[in-house]
Image: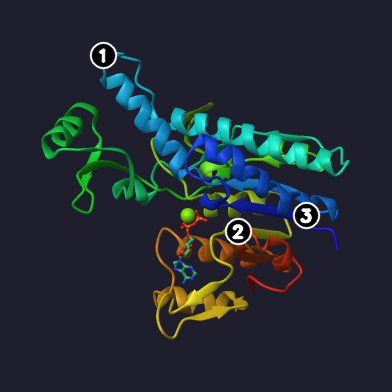
């Protein structure tokens, strides 16, 4: 059966530096193009933690130095990361398609994801970004720029931003039109550029939307059949890293909810993936989600590995 599939790529698909990324995307492109070759419609999403961190750090270092470059707001850093990650991904996929004599257009959409300005996450920012500062510097930044600064595990002080939930995708009609016309689209990169609605305006906010939740949102909006989250592990485990560790091939949303409550999935890494998978599987009958590794994507789709989450 030909499915509409949203594939969310994790950090290991892109690496940590632009040079590393340029190499890694060649491999990343292969399982994606396998899916396209089998006739599936593929929409790609990806993370941007190291990339947006690097841009933000570089821009703030340059602006605090003698170079005195202008300050680059955080949402703009996110937009930059979508641009260069998309540049690498779309070229790698294009090349892999051409190598298989397939003529399929690929494009990246700079994507804004709407969040609620009253999302409770804004009251409790949790995502550390950018450089480490001394306590004194942190206090100055707090006073002068209104940043929330916290002490990060003994390593120094850092700015933290909120991680609100995605509520809508601003470019959904564009993405949908492209997908329906046979284009492979790279969208909601890094969880999307977080924006709030103010009348006719979309205003960028300094925040990080979890890419697993943003991928789930766009999968629902596009009426996808399948959400595939590709990460560094082949399956989801309970008692992860313990002696009684158990890898799971199948998971109902009900079981998953129980395991979430029991604390089997690490917050900020496996938990958002399982939560996104549950939300998608519950959103409409027949929808399913798969969590597996980039390397095992093909086998995962064939039902041979991975963790399949169904209602
Ligand atoms: P990504 O960049 O793909 O989002 P993350 O590092 O955020 O990757 O999350 C994936 C990681 O979650 C895995 O590599 C694994 O180390 C970790 N993890 C935490 N809890 C679990 C669990 N219960 N089962 C499997 N992996 C887990
Ligand atoms: Mg992650």
Instruction: Left or right? Give the position of 250 relative to 224.
Output: left
Residue that label 2 marks: 229
- Callout 2 touching callout 1 (CB < 8 Å): no
Label located before the other in sequence (2 or 1):
1
Question: Does residue 62 lie above or below 91 as drawn?
Answer: above
* Circle 2 crowding by C-alpha within 10 Å: few under 14, some 14–19, many from 20: many
- Callout 3 touching callout 2 (CB < 8 Å): no
Image quadrant where residue 97 sits:
top right
Relative image position of residue 171 (x, y in whole percent): 64, 35
- What distance separates the C-alpha of mark 3 from that of mark 2? 14 Å
- Please tell me which residue is depicted at 84% across the width and 56% down the height of the picture: 38
Relative image position of residue 157 (x, y in whole percent): 20, 42
Q: Secondary structure at mark 1?
A: loop
- What distance separates the C-alpha of mark 1 from that of mark 3? 49 Å
Mark number displayed over residue 66: 1
- What distance separates the C-alpha of mark 2 from that of mark 1? 43 Å
Quarter of the image with the C terminus is bottom right
Please identify, in this view, whether the residue under mark 1 or under mark 3 is nearer the observer: 1
Mark number displayed over residue 188: none
Instruction: Left or right? Give the position of 201 relative to 208.
Output: right
- Please tell me which residue is depicted at 54% across the width and 54% down the height of the picture: 212
Instruction: Left or right? Give the position of 253 relative to 130.
Output: right
Res 210 seen here: yes
Q: Secondary structure at mark 3?
A: helix
Count the marks: how many? 3
Is the shortest distance between ligand 1 and the CB of mark 2 under 8 Å? yes
Residue that label 3 marks: 35
């Amino acid at each position: 059966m030909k499915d509409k599939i949203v594939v969310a790529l994790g950090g290991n698909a892109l690496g940590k530096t632009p040079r590393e990324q340029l190499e890694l995307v060649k491999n990343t492109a292969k399982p994606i193009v396998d899916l396209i070759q089998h006739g599936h419609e593929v929409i790609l999403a990806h993370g941007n933690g190291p990339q947006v961190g690097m841009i933000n750090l570089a821009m703030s270092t340059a602006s605090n130095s003698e170079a005195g470059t202008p300050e680059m707001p955080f949402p703009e850093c996110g937009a930059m990361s979508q641009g260069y990650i998309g540049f690498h991904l779309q070229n790698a996929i294009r090349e892999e398609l051409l190598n298989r004599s397939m003529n399929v257009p690929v494009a990246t959409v700079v994507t804004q994801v709407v969040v609620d300005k009253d999302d409770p996450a804004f009251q409790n920012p949790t995502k550390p970004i950018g450089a480490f500062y001394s306590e004194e510097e942190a206090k100055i930044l707090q006073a002068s720029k209104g940043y929330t600064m916290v002490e990060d595990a003994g390593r120094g002080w850092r700015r933290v931003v909120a991680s609100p939930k995605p509520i809508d995708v601003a470019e959904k009609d564009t993405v949908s039109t492209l997908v329906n016309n046979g284009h492979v689209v790279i969208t909601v990169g890094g969880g999307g550029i977080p924006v709030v609605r103010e009348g006719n305006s979309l205003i960028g906010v300094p925040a990080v939307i979890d890419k697993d939740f943003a991928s789930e949102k766009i999968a629902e909006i596009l009426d996808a059949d399948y959400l595939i989250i590709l990460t560094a592990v082949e399956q989801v485990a309970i008692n992860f890293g313990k002696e009684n560790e158990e890898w799971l091939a199948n998971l109902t949303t009900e079981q998953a909810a129980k395991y979430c409550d029991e604390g089997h999935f690490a917050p900020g890494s496996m938990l958002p993936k399982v939560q996104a998978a549950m939300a998608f599987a519950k959103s409409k009958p027949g929808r399913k989600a798969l969590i597996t590794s980039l390397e095992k994507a093909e086998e995962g789709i064939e039902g041979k590995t991975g963790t399949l989450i169904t209602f």
